Amino acid sequence: MKYLCQGWFGPSALERMRKEEKTSLDRDLPGYEGDLVACGHMIRAEPLQSQKSAVTSHVRNGKVSVTDRPYVETKEQIGGLSLIEANDLSDAIRIPAGIRLAKFGSIEIHPVHTFD
């Protein structure tokens, strides 16, 4: 079953990290994700640019309007997305828990709806 994992982080979480922690994350993350790809769990993972570059699009009465930045005010922002393959929800929870960046934020896990 496929699961979408959203990584949520406080805006200053990465800014508060020491240089050694950032270097360690940069070094370790590709190895763990590579292991997930090799065993068939990781389908795709992408980091997102800063929330400052995001916009929100609305369609109302057939007209599109755009709001600068995300529409919803939150204390955290989405930092990346991963699409994974897991046996069940327990497996889906275990897989992104190994991503070291998870200790600086949270991972929201959604089963992907499939149409039969």
Image (cartoon, rainbow, N blue to C red):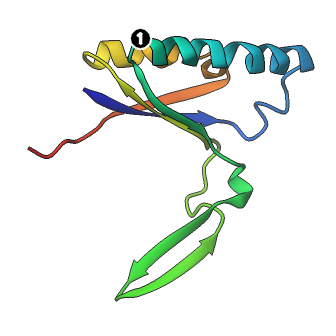
- Which amino acid lies under the numbered mark 1 shown in the image of this protein? Cys
> Which quadrant of the structure image shows residue 91?
top left
Instruction: Please provide percent x and percent y for residue 82.
Output: 48, 33
Residue at the image point whose x is 57% and y is 77% from the top? 66
Residue at the image point whose x is 42% and y is 11% from the top? 94
Under circle 1, the secondary element is loop
Residue at the image point whose x is 60% and y is 60% from the top? 70
11 above or below 99? Answer: below
Name of the residue lying farthest toward the front: 38
Is 40 placed left or right of 115 in the picture? right
> Which quadrant of the structure image shows residue 86?
top left
Name of the residue lying farthest toward the right: 19
Q: Residues within 10 Å of mark 1 (few under 14, many from 20)?
A: few
Residue at the image point whose x is 55% and y is 67% from the top? 56
Is 4 placed left or right of 90 in the picture? right
Instruction: Please provide percent x and percent y for residue 63.
Output: 42, 88
The quadrant of the image that shows the C terminus is top left
Q: Nearer the viewer, residue 73 or 19?
A: 19
Instruction: Please provide percent x and percent y for residue 11.
Output: 74, 41
The quadrant of the image that shows the N terminus is top left
Residue at which label 1 appears: 39
Number of marks drawn: 1
Instruction: Please provide percent x and percent y for residue 88.
Output: 25, 17
Is 59 placed left or right of 67 in the picture? left
